[in-house]
Image: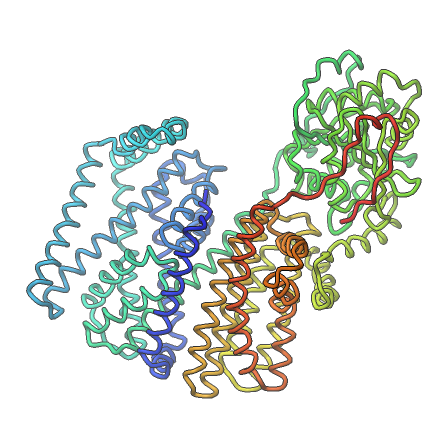
Amino acid sequence: MLKIPSKAQLPLRLFAIVVSAGLFVYLIWRAGPTQLWKSLSELGWGIILALALTGVSHLARTWGWRLTLGDEQHKISFWRMVGLRLGAEAAGQLGILGQSLGDSLRVSRMTSEIPVASGLASVTFDRSFYVVTGILTTIAGVLAALPLVALSQALRLYASLFALTLIAFLMLVLLAVRKRWPVLSWSARSIARIPSLKSWIQKRYLLVQAVESALFDFHHKTPGAFWASFSLNLAAQCMAVSEVCLVLWLMGVKMGFFSALVIEALTKLVNVIGNFNPGNIGTYEGGTMMIGKMFGLSSATGLALALSRRLRSLFWAAVGLVCFVFLTRPKKRRDFTSRGTPRARVTEVPNSQVDTLKDVPALAETAVAILLANRGTDPSNFQGPLLRVGSLPILLRIILAAQKLGPTRIMVIADANTKRIVQRGLFFTGRLPECVQWIEVPPNASFSEHLVLFATQARSERVLLIDGNTTYHPTLIRKASEWKDERVALALTNGDKFVGILALSVETIRDFVQHCQTQVGTLEQLHASLVEMHAVVCVPVGENLWQRVNSPEDRRPAEQKLDRWLVKPTDGIYARLNRRISIPISRQLIKFPITANMVSIFTLVVGFASAVFFAYGGYWYTLLGALLCLFASILDGCDGEVARLKLLESDFGCWLETICDYLSYLFLFAGMSIGLWRGSGSGTYLLWGGLLIFGSVASFIALGWERRQLASGRPEQLLKIWQTHAESRPANPFLYFGRHLEFMTRRCFFPYALLFFALFNIMNVAFVISAIAANLVWPIALYSSRAFAGGRSSAPRIPEASAERRTRMRQYAPIQP
């Protein structure tokens, strides 16, 4: 798990980013922007060759990784492993922490096909091979530098000692492998002596031993695969050296293989040092320029070499991000009987009723039961729960919404014929969760039997009963799940209508079954009986928050309400204007197998295209870039809308959208800087651009930390939470300023402002204003994080009935979304 930066660490990271950004701007100034642009222009479309060479290198490394799986390599496809590698390499752009995260990602995504120990051993071997071959490349490069580069006697001595040290290290590693030294288990036992880590290590010690045994067995039992994997990683290192030759050749510099080997070896040393710098920004470029000087390359050529290789890394990182999005899509289950009907757990109604309830344990958890009733229609034509709203069957929408509550169990209660029709229809959507249990009841069974069965199966203290023929705003199900009164049930109503959601405890079910004298056949009759017994609290909800769907004619109002639910309470005038376009687009997107994460990636591509047109400069290119930026802003709403329409919301999706937004801003600001500099020829715009990018990066980090501090469990609600806290302190001038001007920083407002400035050809004004505004956002974000962290509160809950009024029906304020 990633460690959240502490308050002491954040200023250090911000300082590192400031220094890195300043160093990067200084290097551009030192190399000369004009000369740098000329060198990059000479490279031209030849960069595609470098990208292709790196792609071949990734394929070779993936092949080598696949060999480390031994007999289990057939369990996972080669191209899936390519996607996992690229996704891990994308995370590795963040340094050592990113590499650890990327390797953990590879292991976690292999566990469905490969045992954990085998997957962990293969990833460890793959990383070790790459490190060892990298050390060999460094040794060869250092030794080749002795005759090729003019060095002083002292530097030659230090280089020789350094090479000998690396050789000794490799010999020690080889000896440890041959002698099967238990380095991992010994290290684990040593760490276990620390009291705070003892229990954590003890739980994982067997896994460490299994991984260590797999590592040794791979070398001793399959030496052919061992050396083949090693050779493929070594070939990948040779391709990196060839890339240096290729890039320099495209820029008109003739460089031999051994000279390129020296450059690559010294670059690896720079990368080791740069791992302590987030993103290795500035240090990598500066180190490459210094290495190029040793071979007589100009500063512009050395910096162009570094930027071209960084562009290559960013390209494959973007491909890896797309691969990760595809690999995180939910899989369709493939469990069929011989007749094609999906298997399911079916529970029959027990004969005993009240006696069974006496043995139900009370757990502080919630279970959900969704009841299906054909409401008097022909059972053979009963399709109510399967009617689609927002591309999903109504029942599936309820199940997925209930799943977000983390219930102990989700049960669907229906008669045999209804269960057969609905179960088959939902199974082929590929979205039905594994935790769903189907409970079969006789067609004429009373609702009392339903309750007994449900309470018996739920094994929970709180239960939630939901009508399976109704669409609900997610707020209703979440609010109902927060009801904790043990004696009184909660019912959601709209005037005299029962909405179809009841929250009650097992104890309330006991009392009802024991004292109810009438037969209860439906959920509505249960609500009426509870009202007669004065054992229910009614909370009114708006008509716009639910829609009962019993026929195809009811779908139209349900779809219209679903569209209104896509609009957030925090949306301003520009966001609502974008929604008029984005919602129809999202409605078309959900007809295809397109996920919200795919939309986020495509939006990033459109933002990058906008930045390219800004970089060209000139009135018409700038105007076209502004229009593309506005289109990207509209698409920015589509990913969230698609996620809500398909019920695919996730914390990862929220963070991915945020990262894509930040990258779009960085591309845009870089394009604006280049375009204004090219159009005016003044280096002042590069300085303003450096200030703008620094402020943007600092703001992104500060906002990310603020999201962790204030909305770690609800990242999508950061703005609403921040506004609530800020409005509670109206006398604070700092927060007053931020509260009334924060709309200017939103993704939905900025493109409209940019289009206005581009239309009137005053982009220089927009550029300066953006640079100033970007450096006002991060101080406000840091201040808010510190000021609000102590007062973070959870979402408001439905009030419980007081002890003296538990036996009476009560009315509360309506629930709002």
Q: Is residue 410 above or below residue 612?
A: above
**In x, y percent, where is residue 638?**
66, 60
Locate residue 395 relative to residue 278 in the image: left or right: right
Residue 512 figure quarter: top right
Q: Residue at x 11, y 54 (%)?
A: 161
**In x, y percent, where is residue 343?**
67, 30
Q: Residue furthest front?
A: 731
Residue 384 figure quarter: top right
Q: Nearer the viewer, residue 235 or 267?
A: 267
Q: How is the image coloured?
A: rainbow
Locate residue 524 relative to residue 65 in the image: left or right: right
Locate residue 164 relative to residue 564 in the image: left or right: left
Q: Residue furthest left?
A: 153
Q: Residue at x 17, y 45 (%)?
A: 169
**In x, y percent, where is residue 86?**
43, 54
Q: Residue furthest bottom?
A: 680
- The tally of labels here is 0
Q: Nearer the viewer, residue 321 or 701?
A: 701
**In x, y percent, where is residue 151?**
11, 68
Q: Is residue 316 above or below residue 35?
A: above
Q: Nearer the viewer, residue 428 or 188?
A: 188
